[in-house]
Amino acid sequence: MYSPIEAHDQGMLDVGDGNHLYWEVSGNPGGKPAVIVHGGPGGASSANWRRYHDPEAYRIVLFHQRGCGRSTPDAGLLETDLSVNTTQHLIADMELLREHLGIDRWQLLGVSWGSTLSLAYAQQHRERVSEVILFAVTAGRREEIEWITRDVGRIFPREWERFRDAVPVHDREGNLAAAYARLLADPLTCEQAARDWCDWEDTHVSLDPHYQPSPLFRDPAFRMTFARLVTHYWGNGCFLPDEGDLVERVHLLAGVPGVLVHGKLDVSGPLATAWELHKNWPGSELVVVDEGHGGATMVAEVIAATDRFRAAVSL
C-alpha cells in the first residue's frame, strides 16, 4: 500500500431527505479522479482507503454512504428513517457528489457491498466511469443473500442454528435478514439482535486463512449502525430489480475497463459471482487469489490495477 496521507479537503454534502454525506479528497488535486465505494452496507471508509492509489497521480475521493460513518443521521438510531436509504438513493448521492466536486469521469474502486453499488452506479452512469476495479466481489443477488444467511450454515451448523434461533419461531423459515431488521427496529430487542447478527458476520468469514474477528464489532454504536443497514438492504433484496440483475446487465459496461479480484477461499461470497460477471463483461479481467474475503495478495492486485490505470488520464 502507498504511504499514509491526510485529506486536503472535506465536507458534508446535503443530499436531501434530511441526509448529509461526509466526503473527503486526498492525493493530487489535479490528478485522475478515483472514488472509493466502501463495503457493508454500513461499513464506512477509513484512512487506509487513501492508500490504494498513487497520491501523485490520483485525486482520491472517499465518502461515507447514507446513515453510516460520519454521514448523518446515523442509521444506528432507531428514529432514523431508513425508507430513504436505498440503492437508488446511494447512486443519486454519488452523482451529486461527483457534480459537487466538479468531476466529469471517475474510476470506481469497490469492495464487497461496494462492488454491488459500483456495478449499479456504473450501469446507470456509464459515461461517468473511466474504469471499474472490484474486489471481494458481490452483486446483491437474492441467491447471494440466501447463501450468506442460510445455505452457508451447512458449513457452520452450530453457529447458524444459534443465528437462526435468535429470531422468533414464525420467522425462522423465511427471510432471516428481514426478521433481524424487525428485531433491530425494536428498542427491547435491538441490542441483542445487533450482537447476534455481527457474531454471524464474524463466523462466515472465519475460514479465511487471515481471519481475525472484527474489532469494529466490539463498538456498540458501529455494531448497531452496521446491523441495521445490512439487514435493511439484504432484507429488501438490496433494492435491486428481480428482472435483469447486475450480472445479466453487466454487458452494458462493454468498453469500460474492469478488473475483478476475488479469493477462491471466500466462503461467504463464492467465486461464482465474479466468474459470471467476467464472462458477461466483454474486456474485463478476473484475478483469482488464494485468499478469502480480503488479504494482502488481493490488496496487491488491486494496487497493481490502480497503478496500471493511472496512465490512462481521464480529462
Image (cartoon, rainbow, N blue to C red):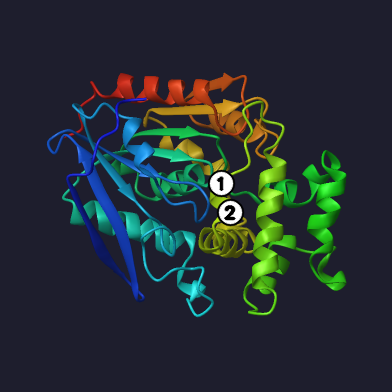
Image quarter in which the N terminus is found: top left
Is 267 in front, or is 215?
215
Seen in the image, is 209 located left or right of residue 261?
right
Mark 2: give few (<14), some (14-19) or many (20+) Cα within 10 Å.
Answer: few
Q: Secondary structure at mark 1?
A: helix
> In terms of image quadrants, where is residue 68?
bottom left
Looking at the rendered structure, the number of numbered marks drawn on it comes to 2
Q: Position of residue 16 (x, y in %)?
A: 32, 72
User: Height in image: 236 above or below 36?
Assistant: below
* Residue beneath the point at 40% across and 47% down: 45
Alpha carbons under labels 1 and 2: distance apart: 6 Å
Q: Position of residue 63 (x, y in %)?
A: 33, 52
* Residue beneath the point at 56% across and 46% down: 215
User: Height in image: 180 above or below 56?
Assistant: below
* Residue beneath the point at 71% across and 42% down: 204
Image quarter in which the C terminus is found: top left
Whether residue 108 is visible, yes or no, is no
Q: Position of residue 14 (x, y in %)?
A: 27, 68
Q: Position of residue 126 (x, y in %)?
A: 35, 43
* Residue beneath the point at 65% across and 69% down: 191
> In terms of image quadrants, where is residue 280?
top right
Amino acid beneath label 1: Pro
Amino acid beneath label 2: Arg
Whether residue 38 is visible, yes or no, is yes
**Which of the numbered marks, if any, corresponds to residue 147?**
none
**Which of the numbered marks, if any, corresponds to residue 218?**
2
Circles 1 and 2, Cβ within 8 Å, touching? The answer is: yes
Seen in the image, is 156 located left or right of residue 199?
right
Q: Label 1 belongs to which residue?
A: 215
Seen in the image, is 224 located left or right of residue 126?
right
Q: Secondary structure at mark 2?
A: helix
